Amino acid sequence: MSRIIDTGLEELSVMLCRMGELTYETVSLSIKGCLNGTSVYSQVHEMSDALISMSDQAEDKTFELIARFQPVASDLRTIKSYMKIAYDFARYSRYALDISYINEQLGGLKECEEWITEYIEKMSEKVLNMVRTSIDALRSHSAQLAKTIAKTEEEVDKMYFEYLDKLIKKAPATSKCTISSVLVVRYLERIADHATYICESVIYLATGEKTTLR
Amino acid sequence: MSYKIEIQSLSAWFGSKQVLQDITMKIKENLVTAIIGPSGCGKTTLIRCLNRMHELTPRAKVTGRVLLDGEDIYSENVDPVTVRRRIGMVFQKPNPFPMMSIYDNTAAGLKLNGVADKHRLDGIVEKSLRAAHLWDEVKLELGKSGASLSGGQQQRLCIARALAIEPEVILMDEPTSALDPTAAAKIEQLIRILAENYTVVIVTHNMQQAARVSDFTAFLYLGKLVEYGLTKDIFENPKSELTEKYITGEFG
């Protein structure tokens, strides 16, 4: 016989994995839209709203599990981590929405020089890899995989500040590009932060160890 | 989802002392409903009214209606024995018949109901012990005394005995209060499994147990139904201040 709490934990886990996949699609779509200059705002908006609602549902479920099953030890760590991760997923989707909003309202990176779009594309790849790592680490509860994110997090942080430096030195032709590109790299950097938080939560739920990967 | 039992304006007395006051609630089929409340609030009396056991106590009285699948079990033309066959009960303290074997304990109700065919009895005994998740532990010693089992096993034997007569509803009166935590956890897991095929009503003084095992919870206080709803809602966001105070441990 399985424990009564297991059914609830499994439901929550399935819910989070579904959120993870949807966030990946959302972030990926908003980045593509921005790099290609195509309008994806309404689609991203819909996906983001769905993710916020799923995050609320996940939070409700964690409350229910705490109230009803008095979780302790690894169960309690799992529930606490899942609650934080659901929030992180919701944040991914909000940053994705912000990126697509910039594309929609300011024209995105259309007026930017090639070196800027190439730079942002490179940074996006790293960030999407981090999002994927966070989802896979969550699915497998692998602390080992989660720890690998630290290196890319450092690289993305470095790229963020390096971009600001470059921008000052090689001022782009239009202020639209300056504002759009700065905001996009800022949001990418924030998505990377949340991917790192998720990996920290995975390490905590799997081992009980509170780690900082930043 | 349909209602298995509908309790309508139910009141109960022991002599002149009223212990239940105008209880109205509907119990859903194939779910677990828990009844919680402080000692003496009428929890046990309420479930004993659901299979007409209350009236077995001298000077006990019941008014109101209890509908089982729409039919009032207190109607004049209803035989209480038939009611008790359809609504089985498991008590606080495991009470296997001490002089009987595990097999005979499980088959006791069937034999009382006139089932004599050995092949049929064998089949039902195995099925009931399996449903009570006891079969694997006792299948090689069915002739052993029921009293030789551990407390938790004895309680599962009593559950098997109740299941053997194929009831539709199982009433449980504090079924784990005499058990250690490990045996109690097994019974709780079993209750969840039983709810797939039976309607279960459990009385418990252990609020955490009600929260863990039930889908719906009723809170009784001084013989009155204070609040009844989804267990999730009762334990997360009770509507009544009295429920809030009880479940947060301010009284009781």
Image: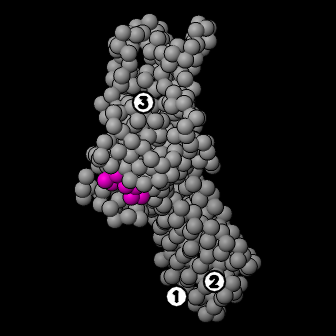
Q: Helix or strand or loop: what does disc 1 sit on?
A: helix
In the figure, is residue A163 to the left or right of A48?
Answer: left
- Disc 1 vs disc 3: Cβ atoms closer than 8 Å? no
Asked whether B221 falls inside the magenta stretch, the response is yes
Q: Chain of mark 1?
A: A
What amino acid is labelled 1 in the image?
Ile
Asked whether B64 falls inside the magenta stretch, the response is no
Secondary structure predominantly adopted by residues drawn in magenta: strand
Q: CA distance from mark 1 to mark 3?
A: 78 Å
Q: From the image, state whether disc 2 or disc 1 is nearer to you.
A: 2
Q: Which residues are magenta?
A: B219-227
Task: Name the foreground residue: A112 vs B43.
Answer: B43
- Disc 2 vs disc 1: Cβ atoms closer than 8 Å? no
Would you identify the image quadrant in which residue B137 lies? top left
> Which residue corresponds to mark 2?
A102
Relative to B216, is B184 above or below?
Answer: above
Work out which quarter of the rendered image holds the C terminus of chain A and state it.
bottom left
Q: Earlier in the sequence, mark 2 or mark 1?
A: 2
Q: CA distance from mark 2 to mark 1?
A: 21 Å
What amino acid is labelled 2 in the image?
Ile
Percent x, y of residue A132: 59, 57
Would you identify the image quadrant in which residue B14 lies? top left
Q: Residue at x 69, y 69 (%)?
A: A29
Number of numbered callouts drawn: 3
Relative to A186, is B234 above or below?
Answer: above
Q: Chain of mark 3?
A: B
Q: Residue at x 56, y 68 (%)?
A: A52
> Which residue corresponds to mark 1?
A168
> Which residue corresponds to mark 3?
B90
Percent x, y of residue B33: 47, 45
